[in-house]
Structures are given as C-alpha cells and as structure tokens.
Image (cartoon, rainbow, N blue to C red):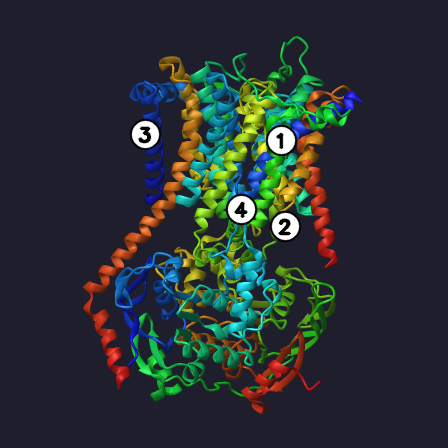
Amino acid sequence: MKRNLFVNLAGVLIAMLLGAIVMLIQGYNPAETYGALFGYSLANFYSFSTTLRNAVPLILTGLSASVAFASGPVNLGQPGQFLIGAIFCVIGGLYVDLPPFLMIPFLLLLSMLGGAFWSGIAALLKKFFRMDEFITTLMLNMIADYLTYWAITYPLFEPRANHPQTPLITKNGFMPKWGNFNTNVIVMLLVFFVIWFIFNRTIAGYEWRISGKNSLFARIGGVKIEKNYLSVMLLTGALAGLAGGLVIMSGPHRFIKGLGANYAWDGIMIAMVANNGITATLLYGLFFSILQTGSLGMELITAVPSELITVLQAVIVLVVVAGRGYFELMIAKIATRRKLKDRDIHPQFIDQNAINREDTKL
Amino acid sequence: MNIMIGLINGMIAAATPILLAALGGTLTYYAGIFNIAMEGMMLSGAFFAVLGSYFFHSWIVGILFGVLGAILIALIFIFFSIFLKVDEFVTGVGLNLFAVGLTTYLLRQIFNVKGAFTDPGIVPIPKIQIPMIQNIPVLGKILSGQNLIVYIALIAVIFITWLVFKTRFGLRLRAAGYNSTCLDTSGVSSNLIRFHSLMLCGILCGFAGSFLSLGYVTLFTENMSAGRGWISLAAVILVSGNPLGIALVSLLFGFADGLGLFLQQSLPSQFTSMVPYVATLIALFIYSIRKKKKEALI
Amino acid sequence: MMTDVITMDHIVKVFPPNVVALDDVSVTFREGEIHAVVGENGAGKTTLMKILYGMQEANSGNIFFKGNQVRFNKPGEAISSGIGMVHQEILLIPEYTIWENVILGVEPTGYFGKIDRQKSRQKVKQQIDEFQFHLDPDARVEDISVAARQKVEILKLLYRNVSFLILDEPTSVLTPQEIPQLFDELRRMRDNGRTIVYISHHLEEVLELSDRITVLRKGSKIDTIESSGATKRSLSQMMVGREVIFESIRKQQKTGDVVFDMSGVDYSFPKNRPLLQSIQMQIRAGEIVGIAGVEGNGQLELVNIIMGLIKPDHGKIEIQGDDFTHASILERRKKISFVSQDRANMGSCLNASISENILMTHHRLNSRFSKWNGIVLEKAQINKFSEEVRNSFDIQMDSTDAEMRSLSGGNQQKTILGRELSLDTPFLLLDQPTRGLDVGSIEYVHEHILQMKDEGHAILLLSADLEELFRLSDRILVLHRGQIVANLETEHTSIEEVGILMLEGGAQ
C-alpha cells in the first residue's frame, strides 16, 4: 500500500519535473506556471467546486475503464458510450417533463441505459460473432460521434443557433446546485461507493476480479464467464453513459457539438495510470481534473497554452506505469541482495549442507 | 465516366495512408508486437510534415520532417515497451494521446492557431505525371497523375513483401513473432529485431502522415488521423499480416471512403463519414463468419 | 588424461524473493565425456546450465572455459564459443521448415540480405547425412514427430560447430523405443570429441549413458562420481537425502456403488481425426482407477470432456445416476473435484491472494461464504476457511492474503489440493497431481489421496508416472490412441505389462 503510494507520487513528480523542463526551455517560469495551475483549480471554494464538477465525468469514465480492464473485457468504448448516454439524456429531457425528484433519476437512468445500449452492441458482436471488443468499441466510438453529430444537426437541432446544438432540456432535469457546488458530485460519490462495494465485497465482483486475472482458472472453477462478460460490458457502458448524462444535466444542459471530445480518452488513461484500482481511479480522476481545470488559469495568467496539460497527462501515464514495473524490479533486486547476505550471516545454513555432504559420502 | 474516375482516384487517395500505416503495422505484427501506436505516429508525422514544408518551402523537407516526427513516437514506444518493458497496450494508448497533446500544443505554440493550420506557404507533395501512360484514355487518368506518395506506397507493398518473405531480416522478424526465445537462443537479439521493425513502422507511418497533410489536403487539423491508425490495425488483423492482403483490404476501405463521398449527394455527411468505420465492422464480421466456417470444416 | 573444458566455480543463484536456487555449486566438465547432472525437481539442474549458457545470470561465482574466465551474457555468446543447449521444451519455430530453423541466426545470404535458399538447403542436407539423422530438410517442423524435432535442435547446434552440448531432460518427450537411438547418437558425438552434459532425473538412463555423474539436491552439489561405481540405490539416496521406498500403501477395501459412469464417449478433432473412441469406464465409491498412457494419447481430451471444457461427439457421463453429459461446469463442480496438471493456468490464479484461490468454486457451492441471498461475500467465514485449509494441509505461507505466486510449487499444489478436497464431492478427477513436486510433497499428496479413498470417494487418477499409478490405484486402464486397450487389476499386473500396452496398444 505504502509502496504503491510512493511509486505513484514519485511518477507524478518526475512527470511534472519533465513538464517543468519543457517550460524552462520555452522560457516560462515553471514555479509560477504550476502555481497558477493549482491556484486556479484549488485556491478557494469556488474553484475547488468547479474542479470537483469537472472531475465527475473523468472519474465515471475512469471507473468504467477500470472495472472493465480489471474484469477482462477491453472496453475502449467509453467515448462512444458517453455520447450515446448524453444524447439519450437530452432526448428524455426534451420530450418528457416530470417534477425534479422524478425527472433527475429518470434522466440518470436513461443515460445509463444509453451507454449500456452502446456497449451492449459490442458485447453481442463478441458473443455471437466473436468480434474482439477492443476494435469494435473503437469503431463504435467513431460511429457514435457522427451519429450524435447528425442528431444535433437535424432532428434535435435548435433552429435559432448558428452551430449544431440541441435546445435546452427541461429545467426540472437540471442537477441542483448549492452555490457553485454541483450535486453531480454526490451522484458520482454514490456510484463510486456502489462500484467499490460490488467489486470488492460481492460474489460477482470476486468472480470478475479473478476472471480478469486468469479466466481459464475462473471458468474451470465454475464461473460463468460469458454471463459475467455481458454484465461487465453493460455495467461499464452504463457508467460511461451516466458520465455523459451528468455532463448534460450539470453543465450546458444541452448537447453541443464536440461535447465528448474533452473526455474522449481520459477515462481509459486514468484507468491505466491507476492500474485499474477503484480507489486509485477516484484519486487520479480528481488529480487530472485539477490539471485540466487549472490549465485554463495557467493560460490566462502565464500564457502557457492549456494544451500543455494534455501532453503532461500522457507523460504522467507513461512515467507512472513504467515506474511501477521498474520499482518491482528494484524490489526483487533488493530481496536478492538481502537473501545473499542472509546466507553469509547464518552459519548453520551452510553447516547443514556440509553435514548433508558428509552424510552422503558415507 | 469522369465520376467513375473521380471515385477511383478518391479510393486510391483514401486507401494510401491506411495502406502505408498497415504495412508498418504488419512489420510489428510479424515481430510479435501489439503495436497500436500507428495512430499517434501518423498524426505526429502529419504535423511535422506541415512544419517542415512550411518553414523550408519544400515538400521534400516536409516528408523528411514527417518521417522524423513519426520516428520520434516510434522511439518513445521503443524506449517504454522494449527498454522499460511497459505493457505494449498501455504504451500505445499513452503515446496516441501524447501525439494528440503534442501536436495541438505545438500547433498553438508555433503557429498560434487552434484547431487547424493552413497557409499558402505550405508546399504540397506533387503529383507525378508519367509520360506515355498519361495519354492512355481513362486508365491514364488513374495510373498517372497520382501523388508521389501513392507510388511510394505501391513500391512499399512490393518491398515489404520481399523483405518479410525472402530476406534474412524477414526470417528473423517472423521468428521474433512466432517464438522470440527461439530467436534469442539462436544468437539473434529479438529486441533488436523489434527495434528495427518499429523504426520501419515509424518511417512508413511518417509517409502516411505526410500524405494526409501534404497530399490528401494541404493543411493540418487537430487529430486529423481520425482513427485511420486503428483501421489499419484492423486491416492487419484481418489478413494476419500478409502485405498483399493488406493492399487489397486498404483499397476496400478506400472504396468505402470514396463511396461515402459519392453518397454525400443523397445522405447527410455525418452518415457518409461513418462509412469507413462501419466498413471495418462489416469486414471484421465477415472475417469472423469465415473463421467460424473454416473451424467447422476442419 | 582428459582435460577440463568448463569449470563452474562457487555458483550462487537467488530467485527473488527468497528462493536459493543454487547454493555455492562447483562442478567441472571434462573434454569428451558424457556428464550427467541429476537431481529432483527443483534441485537446480536446469538453472545451473542456464547460467552456463547465458540465459540466466549468477549472483556470484565464476565460470572458466578452457582455462579462461568467461561470462556469457546471452546464449548467442555461448554458442559462438561452442557451447549449445537443447531445452526441455523444444525451442523451434513450428511454422518454419527444418532448414529454415537450422540456419536461423547464421543465414547464408546473397545480395541485399536475400537468403540463399539453394546453399542453405544443401548445407543442412549435408549435415543431416553426416550425422545420419534421416530428416527431410523441407519438412515443416510442426508436421514432424517430437523425436525428430529434438534432432533438429541438435542439428541446429551442430551446424554452429558446437563442441559442448547440454541436453535438458531429452528423454522426457520421447517414447521408450526412441531412447536407444538418441543414446547412440549422443555416444557417436562423444566419440567425435564433443562433450555432452545430460540433465535427467531418470537414474537408469543416467547409469546407462554417462561417464560421470553430478548430483544436486535442493540447490547444493552433493558430489560428482564416476558412473561405473554407482548404483540406482546409491544415487537416489544422494538425490533425496534418505532412502526412498515407493511401495504400495493401498489397503484392501470394499468398494461401494458406481459413482462415475462414462459410456460410449467419442471425440474427434478435426472431424476426421478421432482422439477418443468409445470410452467406457465405471468407478465405484472407495475406488481409485488409474489411467496409464504415453502423453498425447487422449488424456487431455478425456479430462476436458469430464470437466465440460469440450463436448463429446457421442456418449454419456453419469455421476451418481445423474446425467452430466451436457451439464454446465458449475453443475459438474457440485459432484467433481478437479486437480489439473496445469498448476499455473488452470489450477490456480498466481496473482490473486491465497484465500481468493481457496475460495474458488466454494463461493458458488457453499452458502456459508455469502450473505444477502448469495450476493455479498462473507469475509469472516472466508478467512476462517482459509485458515482451516492452511492448517489441515500444512501449507507454509506468510499470510492467506499473500499472492499465490509467493508460494513454492509444493505449497501451491497443497493449496489447490486443499481447495478441491474440501469440496467433498463424490468424484475426484486428479490429473498428474504430483507433477514437478519433490519427494516429500509427493508423499504428502499420496497420503491425502488415499485418505479420500478411505472416506468412500471415487477417484480417477491420471499420471505419467507408472510407479505412482501402481502405488495408488486399484485398477489401471491403459489409454492408447484414444482407446482404452486394457482394464487391469493392479494386483494382477506389472509395470512391464502396462508399459508394453502403453506403447503397442492391445492385442489387435
């Protein structure tokens, strides 16, 4: 546990150091830049609640990817499932109007349904035609992108707007806000606890974890692999869809062109850097949100383009993952050295062999 | 007739970047690397090609820069996956995102624009008119007058086929994929072979990227590889690496793309843009049905 | 006087976290001898040779080759010095032809790195003739027999002018008739002046073939002796450290009702290649039935069919009268305990914790481990159960939360056995339950199997080790080319008789 924390912190620090070097080369002041970055995302309640709100889709898509990868299915379809979830939510919000206490759960369920529908297609293609989900989900991402683009350009188009977008959804479907604190964070935390519980404390979660590590062993142990595959695909699709729905309900309240672009691969990236751990996904999701939210401030204050953060994120992923492997290697080396020392220190170990040798000569 | 010729030329243009990237992918496929970084290599190649062409007013420097840009990604891939032994999938995904970040960041830093960069100063890669052939009716308009990179791609198909199946490098390359321990114990470092295959893949993806930004169009837009790297990966998987098969499959994707453009008159552009991805799904579908039948026959 | 070729001096090798694989081992190989290295599974024979060959790095110690200190960082360097190794698992490219495999790495080429096929084939052909290997250079390796593949490996080394040959358990993949031929070839090579190191744990072979023998036990060298003075008994005592008497410890016991009933099972794959034909067997409560057969005669398919991993073309499987032919794996597990020969992939999950490994299958069959209608894990019960298994099977571990991979092979097997035997099912399927274990663990496993028999379970035991089958089984069925060719009472048969049946099938 401590080891893990150390590797992650060290990896993040090294990556940020690399970022600092890049800034120096380009003539920026790294301290000032990072100061602006963290200041903008953490300094006060207002900025922190913005960071929290922005963390919601990152964490939910991250959980989606983490649960999928840790259980076996290589679901890379979060971007597409996100968009379909969002469009389902918008459709519900445009054509149905209920009091808020019904409307909000209704829209949340609808967006989960949308995401699950999209991941379900990939799951069925695998089940019936053994088409690998890792390619089909990718292709479905692109298709979802164009499909939603079409939907907001034609059938759901808002007539007065000058670029493709839908009208606002019903006010009853807006996530309530307390000051700048958006309640989508509460939904996300609830979901996090439920997922953590399912994954770590239930029979199904146990089966998923073991199948993800060794599916043959799980299968011969009586685990129904195919059924679990389907439930994991549907669940992770629903998580990504929920992320899409929550973005609509807490943000623009409508589907604007390019909505998902910002979150496209972030979930997958977060899952990878978090080594598919549920809690680690929450933390990294929050951290990436700090970076992304702060990047705007960084650009405003120090003129470092916010795009630098995209590069930094990828570097963090690579460095942390590489560091993890390297660290394990180091630990093995230390263990070897310790064992070698043990041999020299404990004379009886060698004596025992000497005695054995004498034995056999007789 | 002109529509037909236009359609075919559209097909060829659409197929070229996929073909080049897939040829690169086939080398790493044979070497046993799960390489999904073609997307990033292509994107980086496309950006640096524009950079080189714009600043040096030369398409040759453009291609050179494009290739170097793709090799940069290949080198990072090598560093992480071969040297540090990081999971190839994670490395690939990380690098694809890195390429997106890097190109948008540099677009901002160097050209001071967001989204897209276009300028009359970017010199495109020329089209090659082949004497004699260009005068043949109909065929001349297809066989001649294509972009230089199209011809390079064609030569690459033949070269890669020869390289993989006839040479010492090819024998070792395939051995690295089939059983790398066997290759190592035969006295050849499988890591070195992997290194070479990734470098070659980088070069080919560099050409693919240069074609995207200096041939297909003359501009750079954010994320302009648009999943072509993934499609080329699907193409490699579909034909299990065979370079000639890849040429055919790429043409098929090109056809789907061209068909999309053709259909634009009757369908919203969003649907026609979907065609290559739907085509990939359909191709995978047919592949799986055929595989099923084959297995049933044995 | 023979000169020393290679001296390995005070070699130490540690596998993290805490396995001392080689503890200060020194051994000298002389020119032109066949030198056997013997020891139990896990004694360090292969590790020692891999260090010499540059596949693994020693933590301390030196290697001298013809008087000069050397350190090979990779096999390629060893090969160019004239040292070659044939591994236990055959390292060839099945998709390549024989000549392609032989020349890989030292290819004759023409312009631009193009391979000179003509020259390559001819050189390989010449070599084949010279050593009388009777191989077709154009045959693909995947199409030739295992014995032929081994020859290709040797050929590959001879092609590189190797004068020091290491063979790791070469006979483990051969049928008994093929062994004398291999020995002839090895002797011929020795007589040509080559040095041969022969790793084995088959003492008879070693005594027949070798000039000198080095014995390893648990990572330490016991001694190097001349074979002429050694006997099987003295060697086995050196190997194990005490006298080992594998005698039958079966008790006569009344058997009960038929528990496991398999009838008319056929299986072909592909369609025209029958792998199992009309398999018929009945196992009663309190009975152990052993399956003997050379590997690859249908054992794998038999196990997979019983477990439901593949479906038979015809036939029926019943357990206690219930039809299991089409049952799901989970249904089967209610009546079948299963110990797989593939410990790392099928028998356990190495990167999960020990208690997670122990919980498998129980989590669905025993309501004790879940609450809320079988939805939520009952942690306290799981921990208690893991401790119970740990204690009753005497598994050496730090904690049940440690990863499975941190256990030694013997303790992993005990963990698997503990899980499966606690299922307390009427039928047990044990596939090579002692493969790769040391003598102590083997005895332990055997005791537990016999105890299960006493408790009235029906047991089907597959083993490549005939002594094990004779020690435990009441009846022995011989599997040959997918057919049961004999059904013998252990009392009324002999290892020799079973051996002949395994090789030649029935009396047809």
Residue receiving disc 4: A71
* The one of C88 and A185 positioned closer to us in this rendering: C88
Q: Which numbered marker is on residue C86?
A: none
Q: State the separation of the CA atoms marked 3 and 4.
A: 34 Å
State which chain disc 2 sits on: A
* The one of C106 and A212 positioned closer to us in this rendering: C106
Q: State the separation of the CA atoms marked 1 and 2.
A: 47 Å
Residue C477 locus on image (x, y percent):
62, 81
**Label 1 neighbour load within 10 Å: few <14, some 14-19, many 20+:** some
Residue receiving disc 2: A226
Nearer the viewer's eye, disc 1 or disc 3? 1
User: Left of B20 or right of it: where is B271?
Assistant: right
Secondary-structure class at tag 3: helix
Q: Is residue A202 above or below residue C416?
A: above
State which chain disc 3 sits on: A
Secondary-structure class at tag 1: helix
Is residue C163 at least partly visible in the picture? yes
User: Left of B199 or right of it: where is B213?
Assistant: right
Residue receiving disc 3: A17
Given the image, on which type of amino acid does mark 3 rest?
Answer: Leu
Secondary-structure class at tag 2: helix
Nearer the viewer's eye, disc 2 or disc 3? 3
Which residue sits furthest top?
A160
CB contact under 8 Å: marks 1 and 3: no
Nearer the viewer's eye, disc 1 or disc 4? 1
